Structure formats: C-alpha cells, structure tokens
Image: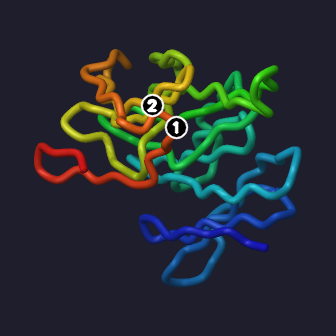
Amino acid sequence: RQWFTIQDGALYVRTDKADGLDAIDATTGKLRWQSHEKFDAPGLDDLPLVADGIVYDHHGNHLYALDEKTGRRLWHQQISADRSFYPGRFYNGTFYIYSALFRQQPTHPYEFQERVQAFAARTGATLWTSPVGYKLLSDIPVTDGLIFTERNYQGVSKISALNASSGNARWQFTDSCSACTTISAVVSGKALY
C-alpha cells in the first residue's frame, strides 16, 4: 500500500514498508528527495503537513520536521504518548498536534488520555501541553488565534476553544450528550457549527 498527498508542487509518498518519505516533483515526476527517517513499524496512514517551507511528518510518537526543499531533518521530538494523531495544524509559526496514551482501566476496556501540544515550528521546542482530555476538533484550522478542541474527560464532553499562544481555555461548551463524540464541525464567520 501507498499513502500520498500533493502540497506545494510536490507529491509526498510513503509505502507500508515504513522506509521513509519520498518527495516527487508533481510536474516532472523526478525524485526531489527521500527522507532517511526509518520507522520501527509499517502501517502509518497519516499524511505529512507542509507549511512555511517545512514538512511535518510523524510515526507513532516520533514527530519530525524536514526541510521542504532538501528533506534534511530540522528537528525531532519524541512525544510522551503511545501514538500521535493527525492532521496537525500550523498557525503563526507554531505546529499543533494531539497525542494519546492508551491506558487499561478497571471500569472500561480502555481509555485514551489525549492532549494537544504546541511546538515552535522552526526549532521543535515545546511551547505548551494541554491538560488530559483535549483533542483537535475535526479539520478546523486555527481561527482568530483559537484552536477548537473536543474534551472528553471523566464522562463529560465539552467543545472548547484554546488560546493558540498559551493553550489556556478561552471558553468551553458542555455538550448535552455526555457520551457523544463530535463527528464534524465547521467555523463560518464568528460561529462554530
């Protein structure tokens, strides 16, 4: 199997052999570069994000930033999680991702302890990490300095807006269905639907 995405004139391709990421010129079909990040396990079906000259890629709990032109590693972070999740977000020089720790619970078969994390896009420095229970909401981009999240924690479901700079909750809305998960959402103007 192969996974691919086209961004900024390049086709980024990964195979289930987990042997790195290829950047192919979308116009000529020539290989621009191949990453030399070798992953431990196959089956990664998440795609890289390209923003501001950087390709953000990950496998499991390893997050990589590669130079868009050369594929050279700019930085690497090992996230304290069993798995990191995409799609990530890029906003104002910051890269956001949410990750989860898988935990066996006595009252439930399992629980994911999810968190949103913010990294300096150029250096990979951790800027902030949310409390447990937050995950990025749908495919909504960072809007007006806010990151929209869903928080499922201790049986309570909330839609939240986090300040993109600090990670602090600007507002939270308690969902009337505490056992529900938000499937999709969209921002239009100043409203979240």
- Residue at numbered disc 2: 157
C-alpha gap between disc 2 and disc 1: 7 Å
Q: Which mark is residue 82?
A: none
Q: Quadrant of the N terminus?
A: bottom right
Give the residue at x 65% y 72%: 31
Q: Position of residue 90 (x, y in %)?
A: 39, 41
Q: Position of residue 142 (x, y in %)?
A: 31, 40
Q: Nearer the viewer, residue 95 or 36?
A: 95
Q: Nearer the viewer, residue 142 or 107?
A: 107
Give the residue at x 72% y 34%: 61
Q: Secondary structure at mark 2?
A: strand
| Residue 164 in view in this figure | no
Q: How many marks?
A: 2
Circles 2 and 1 in contact, beta carbons < 8 Å: yes
- Residue at numbered disc 1: 179
Residue 38 position (above or below residue 107): below
